Amino acid sequence: MATFELYRRSEIGTCLTETLDEMVQAGTLSPEHAIQILVQFDKSMTEALETKVRSKVSIKGHLHTYRFCDNVWTFILQDALFKNEDKQETVGRVKIVACDSKLLNQ
């Protein structure tokens, strides 16, 4: 597997998928090309997070659910407090999906 499909359920990933579906249905884009675009999207998001993001955040909250399946951790936190150097934010419910980045290069 060249890349995980982690970012497709994000807001931007959902919008991209819906737009590509519309283009395929209208006949302006082939299904194969749409899949290539989605794979490139996942690779670009992974690369951007690895090279552009330099901030560190601490997260505290009530761990509602966790699971480990296919080398992917999923955590659901309630009343999560996100804190970095200059500000903090509380979120009622958050889902965190984490995987080993070494698996992306296989």
Image: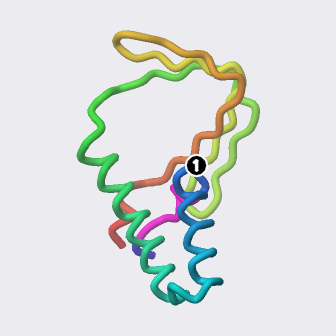
67 vs 14, left or right, is right
Figure check: 62 above or below 87: below
Does 47 sit above or below residue 54?
A: below
Magenta stretch: residue 81 in it?
A: no
Residue 101, percent from left and from top:
38, 55
Q: Main secondary structure of the magenta part?
A: loop
Span colored in magenta: 3-8
Q: Which residue is mark 1?
A: 11
On whether residue 5 falls in the magenta region, the answer is yes
Residue at (37, 64) in percent of width and height: 43
Mark 1 secondary-structure assignment: helix
> Where the C terminus falls, by quadrant?
bottom left
Q: 98 or 18, which lies in front?
A: 18
**Three-letter code, disc 1:** Glu
Of 49 and 59, nearer the camera is 49
* Position of residue 31 measured from the top left corner of the image (x, y, whole percent): 55, 87
Q: Quadrant of residue 75?
A: top right
Q: What residue appears at the point 58 percent right and 89 percent down from the top-left corner?
A: 27
The scheme the figure's colours follow is: rainbow
Q: Considering the image in quadrants, where does the N terminus appear?
A: bottom left
Residue furthest to the right: 64
Judge from the rendering whether residue 12 lies leftward or rightward of residue 80; answer left or right. left
**How many neighbours does mark 1 have within 10 angstroms: few (below 14), some (14-19), or many (20 or more)?**
few
Q: Position of residue 62 (x, y in %)?
A: 70, 22
Q: Residue at x 54, y 57 (%)?
A: 13
In this view of the protein, which residue sits in the foreground, 105 or 86? 86
